Image (cartoon, rainbow, N blue to C red):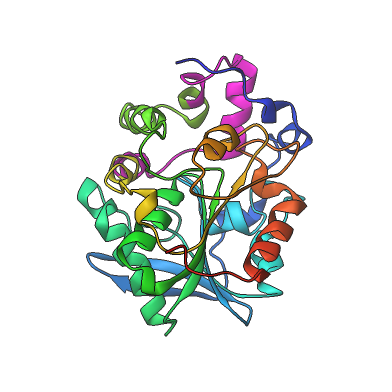
Amino acid sequence: MIRQPYPELQSPFFAQSFVRNPIRYHPAMGRVSVSTKGGYLSVVEEGQGEPVLLLHGWSGDVERQWRGGLFPGAPDVLGGLAQSFRVLAPDLRGHGESAPSLEVGDYGRQAADDLLAVLDFFEVPRAAIVAYSMSATIGLFLASVAPERVSRLILGDSLGNVPGADLDYILSRASAMRAGLSYGEMLALESELSEEQVQGINALVGPIPNSAALAAAADGSLEHRVDPEAVCVPVHILSADPGVSEAAQALTTFPVTIVPQTSHMDLFLSPQFVEEIKHILGAPHEPRH
């Protein structure tokens, strides 16, 4: 299905799409490599307080999504949260500086085991999880199979892999990566984009060096099927406007907060994103069951 053109392409954020920020291209300081089955995750730790596991979206990484490395002036989400929490932010398997894999099976249950390895390494018995976009499938899956390790879960503009969620785009993106398409060409399959917009997206994102691993990661996320009624930890959805809010409100199992005047691709760039996370994590909570 062809969707309407991405509204974020007209936003001030993406008006700077041809400007590169050098922070993207240099290894982050203070990283730790955590051994996992068949590889390792590169993790940034910062701050003190309640531990929070901060998970970036598909094809992203800590530097671009959470450290303001997408373009000059983008917010340091990780730094903002680290003012109040002990933040553990891994590059997920196949992303950033973490080990890649071309095996789809390494991104199913193993993706959840990777996160448990991070918690074990940092001696964190239980953590809150903030999972953005496609990583919501991992976060919700982890909360279902190891609820004793998850205090609460915030899903960033995603329902995860639950009954009724539209996951066709995952298959489409996996196919696009295997076909060697650029990021802009991939999004043009989902929305009516001009050639100028496609080139702007490509300039912003840059080349995709790990497309085969990203394809495997996308397919592997389909293994994270979860019955939301079976999740016993508190779950809250932060939705873009428009975003998954309509579908999320229909899924009355989880409460939803909409961040006005944002889209899926720039929700995490809004100052309200960090403030809402702090508010949700600071509120009293009890197990759902």
- In the rendered image, residue 193 lying in the magenta stretch gets the answer yes
Q: Which segment is the magenta one?
A: 187-216
The rendered magenta stretch, by its main secondary structure, is classed as: helix
Tag count in the figure? 0
Q: Residue furthest bottom?
A: 123
Query: Which residue is located at x 59 percent, y 52 percent?
Result: 65
Query: Which residue is located at x 39 percent, y 62 percent?
Result: 143
* Residue 179 x, y percent position in the rendering: 32, 26
Establish if 132 lies above or below 62: above
Establish if 247 lies above or below 118: above
- In the rendered image, residue 167 lying in the magenta stretch gets the answer no
Q: Looking at the figure, which quarter contains the N terminus?
A: top left
160 or 54, nearer to the observer: 160
Establish if 117 lies above or below 130: below
Relative to residue 34, is residue 132 drawn left or right?
right
* Residue 166 x, y percent position in the rendering: 41, 31
| Residue 9 in sight from this viewpoint | yes
| Residue 103 in sight from this viewpoint | no
**Residue 51 falls in which quadrant of the image?**
bottom right
Query: Which residue is located at x 69 percent, y 65 percent?
Result: 278
Query: Which residue is located at x 71 percent, y 34 percent?
Result: 14
Relative to residue 228, is residue 72 drawn left or right?
right
